């Protein structure tokens, strides 16, 4: 270590001062040169240790010294990992907040529509909600159905119930020739895309639907699996109890 520092000091001083004009040991220039050489040697230690370890015939064996040096210089990588984990958790929190806001939006929109109808029935003049009308105009039927299903999670909805919720949001379904068939077709596409879950009721075997949240924790996934198994078990039990038609 001292030999390498001495060589580096000689090189530094020789490159800065002529041979016959090198300052004395007490000079500030010599002090600065020694400090720079020591810092350079300290930074070079990990790389020299790694190079020596890798040049050994048994490359897979690392000496305790090289391991300690590697751990000492891993603080920056550890900081990156902490920052990544913090950002990932923040994204989960933001998506959870977004889910709660979207659920609340459905409730408020339905309240606005219901109150507007009540005011109209009582002869009370109110200004229409431009924001509610804009959401209806800019959202497709599939987007609205997806929003309704997600707002009712973890509950399940029948297609007829989805139709009722659409009406409460202010959708005019009279533009469709067969609104119920259109809702069935949209639900089928959402199930095929994996965006919506589908199962059948144990009592009458009719299809029901729901949309899980975007962020699924492990506990939520386990609960959903158990719930789906319970529905399937009830459905099989009902099928066994149903008498066969002769």
Image: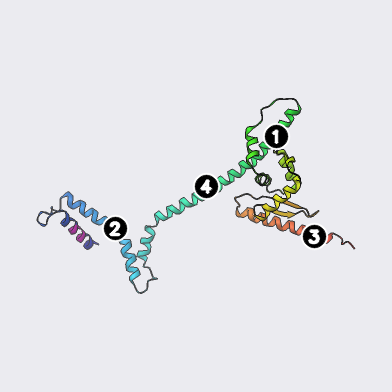
How far apart are the two marked residues, 1 and 2, measured between alpha carbons?
Answer: 72 Å
- Residue shown at the point (49%, 52%) measured from the top left: 85
Classed neighbour count for the residue bearing mark 1: other residues with Cα under 10 Å, few (<14), some (14–19), many (≥20): some
Query: Residue tagged by mark 4?
Result: 90
How far apart are the two marked residues, 1 and 4, measured between alpha carbons?
Answer: 35 Å
- Residue shown at the point (68%, 53%) measured from the top left: 189
Query: Residue tagged by mark 3?
Result: 237
- Residue shown at the point (80%, 60%) measured from the top left: 237
Q: Quadrant of the C terminus?
A: bottom right
Location of residue 106 by image quarter: top right
Location of residue 235 by image quarter: bottom right
How far apart are the two marked residues, 2 and 4, measured between alpha carbons?
Answer: 38 Å
- Vertical placement of residue 52 versus 12, above or below: below
Q: Specify the segment rendered in magenta.
A: 6-11
Which of marks 4 and 2 precedes in the sequence?
2
Confirm or deny contact between disc 1 and disc 4 (CB under 8 A): no
Location of residue 65 by image quarter: bottom left
């Amino acid at each position: 270590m001292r030999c390498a520092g001495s060589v580096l000091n000689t090189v530094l001083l020789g490159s800065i001062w002529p041979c016959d004009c090198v300052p004395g040991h007490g000079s500030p220039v010599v002090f600065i040169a020694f400090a720079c050489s020591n810092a350079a040697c300290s930074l070079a230690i990990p790389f020299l240790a790694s190079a020596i370890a890798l040049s050994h015939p048994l490359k897979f064996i690392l000496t305790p010294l090289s391991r300690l040096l590697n751990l000492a210089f891993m603080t920056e990588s550890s900081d990156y990992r902490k920052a990544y984990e913090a950002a990932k958790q923040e994204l989960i929190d933001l998506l959870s907040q977004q889910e709660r806001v979207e659920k609340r939006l459905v409730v408020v929109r339905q309240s606005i529509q219901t109150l507007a109808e009540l005011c109209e029935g009582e002869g009370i003049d109110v200004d229409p909600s431009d924001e509610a009308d804009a959401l209806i105009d800019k959202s497709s039927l599939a987007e609205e159905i997806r929003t309704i299903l997600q707002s009712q999670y973890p509950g399940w909805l029948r297609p007829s119930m989805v139709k009722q919720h659409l009406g409460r949001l202010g959708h005019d379904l009279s533009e469709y020739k067969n609104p119920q068939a259109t809702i069935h077709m949209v639900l089928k596409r959402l199930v095929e895309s994996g965006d919506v879950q589908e199962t059948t009721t144990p009592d009458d075997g009719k299809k029901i639907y729901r949309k899980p949240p975007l962020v699924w924790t492990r506990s939520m996934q386990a609960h959903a699996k158990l719930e789906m198994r319970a529905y399937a078990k009830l459905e099989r039990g009902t099928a066994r109890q149903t008498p066969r038609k002769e």
